Amino acid sequence: MGLYLIGDAQGCDSALGRLLDDIGFSPSRDRIYLLGDLVNRGPESARVLRRIAGYGAAARCVLGNHDLHLLGVAAGARSAGRKDTLQTVLDAPDRAAMLDWLKQQPLAIFEHGWLMVHAGVLPQWSVELTLELAREVEAALRGTASDDFLQSMYGNLPAQWTSDLSGIERLRVTVNALTRLRFCTADGVMEFNISAGPETALPGYLPWFDVPRRKTEDTPIAFGHWSALGYLDRPNLVSLDTGCVWGRRLSALRIGATPIERELFQIDCPGAAG
C-alpha cells in the first residue's frame, strides 16, 4: 500500500488527475491525504470534490481556508470575492451532497506518525491539544447551528491562544491557526497580513514552525497553505503547497513506515489564477 501526502489542489482537477496517474494511485490499494484547499481559484472545484469524495476511504483531507470559505459563501455568511471560482459547486445539482461531504472532513489528522494540517500549529499546542481543538470546530461545522458558527467564524481576534478561551473565540483561534497561520511570535501571537516568504516576517515574528521549543517540534508535521514558501523538507516538517494554481507545480510525497522514508513526485501545472 502506498501512502501519499498531496499539496493544495485549489480546483485544479486536471492537474490532480495527472499527478495521481503519475504516482500510479489505486484506491483499492493506496491512501492519499490532501492537505486542504481542495477548491477555489482553479476552474474545476466541483470536479475535485467529486473525485476525492468518490475515492471513499482511500482519500482523506483536512479543511483549508478556501474550503471553509466555500462553506461560508454557501451559508450566506460571506460574499464571494472577485477572484473566487466557486460557482461550479454552488450551481451544481449535487451542491448539497458536496457541501455536506466537505463539512464531514477534519481540520487535523494524526495517522502513520504524521500530524497533518492545512496551515500550522501554535507553539503552545501539543498534538493531543491540536486534535482536541480541531474536533471542537468539526462538531460546530456538523451541528444544527453550523450556519451560526460560519457567520461568526471570521475575524483575526483573538490573535493569541489562551487556555481560558471559550465559545466562538476559542473556535476562531483554532480555525485561524489550523487554516491561516504563517507567522507568529514566540508566545503565539498570530499575524495574517503577510503571505510572502519567511524572509518578509515582521520584527518579533517567525514562521510558526521555527518558534523555539514548539511543543510539536518532535512530531512529523505536513502542511500546505504557504505557496510562497513552496516545498520545504526537514526531518520533522514538510510543506507541500507548491503553487499549482499559480502555474508552478502540484506535489505529492510518498511516506513510508518511518518519517525519513520519503519520495517526492511533482508535475508542472499551467496555472489557473490571475
Image (cartoon, rainbow, N blue to C red):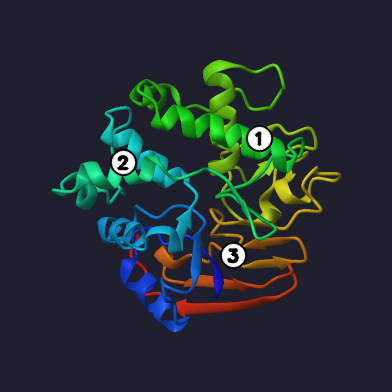
Nearest to the observer: residue 142 or residue 231: 142
User: Which residue was labeled with disc 3?
Assistant: 230
Callout 2 crowding tier (Cα within 10 Å): few <14, some 14–19, many ≥20: few
Indicate which disc, 2 or 3, sits on the residue closer to the N terminus: 2
* Quarter of image, res 14: bottom left
Q: Distance of mark 2 from mark 3, alpha carbons? A: 31 Å
Indicate which disc, 3 or 1, sits on the residue closer to the N terminus: 1
Name the secondary structure under disc 2: helix
Q: Is residue 76 above or below residue 168?
A: below
Q: Amino acid at mark 3?
A: Gly
Indicate which disc, 2 or 1, sits on the residue closer to the N terminus: 2
* Quarter of image, res 221: bottom right
User: Which residue was labeled with disc 2?
Assistant: 100
User: Which residue was labeled with disc 1?
Assistant: 190
Residue, x 27% and y 36% (percent of image)?
A: 74
Q: How far across and down, in percent of the image, does residue 87 sit? A: 21, 48
Residue, x 47% and y 47% (percent of image)?
A: 64
